[in-house]
Image: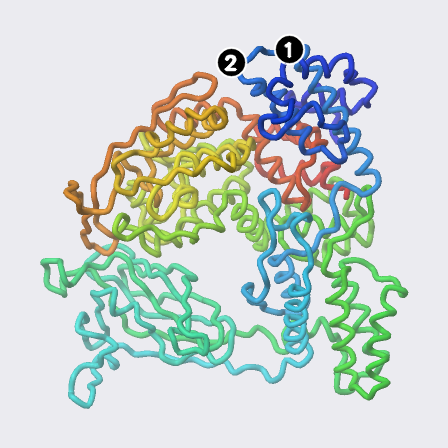
Amino acid sequence: MRQTVGRRLLALLALAWAGPAAAADFTTTVAPVFKEFCLKCHGGDKPKGDLSLETLAADFAKNGETWKTVLEHVSDGSMPPKEKPQPSAGQRRAVSEWIASGLVAQAKVFTAANGRARLKRLNRVEYINTMRDLLGAEIDPEELPEDGIASGFDNVDAALDLSSSLLGSYLEAIDVALGNALSPGKRPKTTTQRVDYPALGKLKTKTNRPMPRLGTSTIVKEQEVIFVSAAMIEKPVVDALADTPGLYRFRMRANTVNTGKPLTLLIYTGNYGRGVQGLLTRPVAMVDVPAATTTVEFTVPLLAHETIKMLPYGMGNVYTDAEENHQLPGMALQWIEVEGPLIDAWPPEPTKRLLGEFDLAKASAADAEKVLRAFATRAFRRPVQDAELQPYLDLIKTRLDKGYSVAAALRVGLTGVLSSPDFLYLSATPGRLNDYDLASRLAYFLWSTMPDDTLIALAKRGELGKPAVLRQQVERLLNDARAHRFTENFVGQWLSLRNLKATIPDKKVYPDFDDWLLHSMPLETYSFFEEILRHDRPVTEFLHADWSMLNERLAKLYGIPGVNGSEFRKVSLPAGSHRGGVLTQAAVLKVTANGTTTSPVVRGAWVLDHLLGTPPPPPPKDVPAIEPDIRGAKTMREQLEKHRSIERCAGCHAKIDPLGNALENFDVIGGWREYYRTVPGNGRSKVMIKTFKGLDHPVGKGLDVDAKDELPDGRKFTSVDELKQFLLADSDQVARALGQKLLVYATGHRLEFADRASVDALLASSKPSHYGFRTLIHELVQSPAFRTK
């Protein structure tokens, strides 16, 4: 740990680490403060909030969480309430020091005996990635139950239990994976299929009518078919479904017509009702067709019995536009070709690595032992002792004695290895991590999978723990394509983007919401995150930046001209734009709303928790939630007034509501608004909203938006732009909040009270870089908190 600590390292923590003797005495100093200022509310038979400071025992092992809550309210000045008599600064400090001393002393005792983190199971994502790296297995996430969540993440030890049903799911996945790895069979045949569109368009049915698969909204020429209706081209383009799951390459000869710019296709894969599971479809890619005739190529994974369909954006509407069909924007297609499955080598590389030079048909018991030993070393992510390996060798021997083939007996032994706690759990002894455990922690932090050969080799030589070597490996892992898993898994949970599809906006109110927008939303945030990480930009840019990563669809939503196509690129935000930072990105704005309305409470609480690291407590159980007025007669601000009038709610809502009110200019899908939309009808005035497909839809025009408010400290603002400047004034807190989230995610353990000192040290070491995000990750990996259990 670096010798200097940040300016925000609380003096009470430093005092607490010196030991209980340095803290104030409870009887002579703390108890009198409680009696004078606290017991009137938090004493007696009916204490407020069910918290009695008369009966709360100073047992920090048993009552630690309650004492943490007391400490937070005393140290931040929120208790006693402002209208009540207040303790002096010295009294408040004495109480804080006494509580901090007890909490830290308890943390020392626990950590010395058990380590900071607990035994941690691989979560679903980590398990799937690890099985892929070990055996080449492609496990459908839906085949495994979802993991629990603790401290905002699904890789935290406290939420990762192992149920009998989960173990059963593991055994099913193991059986399939080993079957494919040990007996891959013949190499699947790679085939090429081609659809010629002019020939297809000229085909006639028995009634001498054009083939219905192209429809009437097409123009058939000698060399191409011009599509001017999205409804026609969005149908499946290849009738033959994939026989074998794998990677398939699609190539098509195409260009846009009457538009002068690229046209974006959203690519879906699915079985479209022709598979045993019925209609399944999902968007997987975006492809741009240029104005000039070009061969466009893209590669997508397909499951068995799947094909693709293409949904274009930017075409006109043949039913409402005045122009003739041939004058509408469209896409000309000559042919489309599919090749696959694409196979680099056979047998697959994981099978070669598993079996090495051995032919199972001719292998001996000694060969099976060699295969098992090598596999267990990789699966356990460390050297395996003979005594550890013996139970699995016994499984093989027992099966061989019963007449099993070597292949069948080996399969039983390998199943045992993959069912072992040494594979399913990331374990370590209390204290400083050895190099193998450090390799695992680093790999699962940045790649969500097992350490690769390079990390294991460095661990074997005892070099990984050297600061310079560790820094080099962090750079290597961050520069690898697998680091995108860190982006998706960390950002997806830190900013709640995994919930993006939990609600779908009401089409009556938001007809301009579409699949291209939904597919683009998280990609902006992921690209923004990776741009900050790649260039070590200050973490304060997560709160506000004068640029973003945009494609055409998001730029249109944000009112930013000159951005064409599906590709994301760095775009400077124009003067006067209300965008900048994740707070005003469409993905975050959608995930903090429901399908019809926005709530300042939901958005304000989200900002406090996810960006400022100060989550509000849950609301009182007996206070009903606010039901939005979907008629638009009252704004949410007006309805919130009754909550602010309730004494128990006023304190929290004074912190929550202003942050949410500042975001009221952003609607359910992340668009800027001056008024609320409502369902059309009931005599309300209407406005016409144009969709990206060119259709006009009426929506009701509701009340005007009022985004101005006042922070608890009296600072007033009129817009989200002013609020962000207030929040940026405390850049340390912005960095602290992110540092805390990273520490939880990286170590797989909740933030303990004693970790506050670790976070302070982390901020102090990264502050010279203005809290550069890449620097922050480097300093986290070098820190004692990361390098100890």
- Name above or below for residue 80 compared with residue 88: below
Residue 262 percent across, percent down from the top left: 29, 56
Instruction: Provide the residue designation for mark 2.
Output: 83
Mark 1 and mark 2 in contact? Answer it, CB < 8 Å: no
Give the residue drawn at x 61%, y 26%.
Answer: 47
Instruction: Name the kind of residue labelled 2 in the image.
Output: Glu
Instruction: Provide the residue designation for mark 1.
Output: 89
Q: Is residue 632 left or right of residue 621?
A: left
Residue 538 seen in this snapshot: no
Give the residue drawn at x 29%, y 43%.
Answer: 630
- Name above or below for residue 515 compared with residue 535: below
Q: Quadrant of residue 380?
A: bottom right
Give the residue drawn at x 21%, y 69%.
Answer: 226
Q: Quadrant of the C terminus?
A: top right
Instruction: Name the kind of residue labelled 1 in the image.
Output: Ala
- Name above or below for residue 242 compared with residue 108: below
